[in-house]
Image: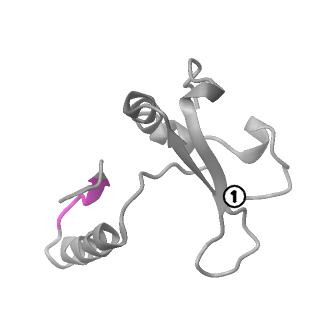
Amino acid sequence: MGVDDINLQEIDTAHRAPGRQPTNKFNAIICKFVRRLTKDRVMSLWREAFNLWPEDIGFDAEQTCQIRVYDHLTPKTQDLLFQASSCKIAYQFYFCWAKNGLVFC
């Protein structure tokens, strides 16, 4: 993704988490960083992740899913983001997003 100065010591834990509904896609990789600054560096490059494919970083090329990076949202914040997205459509707002656990419209 372009974050070259991150090493394994800056990752506290990482594991795969299955989705809520079973699919044939890869399970999400959940990563917790040791320092908030490291997380902020990774999250600042989330747009570049949209241009990556699994084979670009050494995964099986037969999978057709793209790489996505999302910030963690609590279930309550996920619900708030869903409701805000509905209001965005109803009131014709242009943007609605979440950053650092907060919802913006």
Tell me which corner region of the image, top left, top right, bottom left or bottom right, holds residue 57: top right
| Type of the residue with mark 1 | Cys
Q: Position of residue 104 (x, y in %)?
A: 19, 57
Q: Quadrant of the N terminus?
A: top right
Per the image, label 1 sits on a secondary structure element best described as loop
Determine if the magenta segment contains residue 94: yes
At 17% from the left and 65% from the top, the residue drawn is: 93
Q: Position of residue 33 (x, y in %)?
A: 50, 38
Q: Residues within 10 Å of mark 1 (few under 14, many from 20)?
A: few
As drawn, 52 above or below 65: above
Q: Nearer the viewer, residue 101 or 95?
A: 101
Determine if the magenta segment contains residue 47: no
Left or right: where does residue 14 sit relative to residue 80? right
Tell me which corner region of the image, top left, top right, bottom left or bottom right, holds residue 52: top right
The span shown in magenta is 93-98
Q: Position of residue 105 (x, y in %)?
A: 17, 59
At 55% from the left and 25% from the top, the residue drawn is: 3
Q: Nearer the viewer, residue 2 or 5?
A: 5
Q: Mostly what secondary structure, the magenta segment?
A: loop
As drawn, 91 above or below 96: below
Residue 84 appears in view: yes
As drawn, 78 above or below 70: below
